[in-house]
Image (cartoon, grey):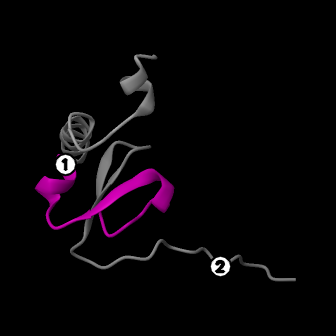
Amino acid sequence: MALFRRVRKPAGKPGEWFYCIEHHKVEEGPECPAKDRMGPYPSRADAERAMETAAERNLQWENDPRWKDRAREEGED
């Protein structure tokens, strides 16, 4: 029986920036699990804008004329 448990740290490289959606903070190199973070980003400033960038990309995707949704075409909600 082991007295100490091995703690797994998330993989990543120094200089990569992430945004943790659970703690609402920027991390250099991943600290939180992958399910809770966005990135990697090339700079701290880009990671700080992660939620804004995601919102902008979602809006672009939703308004992309190439994207088709049967419910929209059929007039359903």
Compared with 11, 38 (above or below) is above
Expressed as whole percent of the image width and height from the top left, the position of residue 24 reads 34, 42
* Residue that extends furthest to the bottom in the rendered view of this protein: 1
Res. 6 mark: 2
Res. 76 mark: none
Query: Which stretch did the figure color magenta?
Result: 28-49
Compared with 39, 66 (above or below) is above
Quarter occupied by the C terminus: top left
For label 1, the SS is helix
Q: Quadrant of residue 53?
A: top left
For label 2, the SS is loop
- Camera-side mark, 1 or 2: 1
Q: Amino acid at mark 1?
A: Glu
Query: What residue is shown with label 1?
Result: 48
Residue visible at 21% across and 74% down?
15
Q: Earlier in the sequence, mark 1 or mark 2?
A: 2
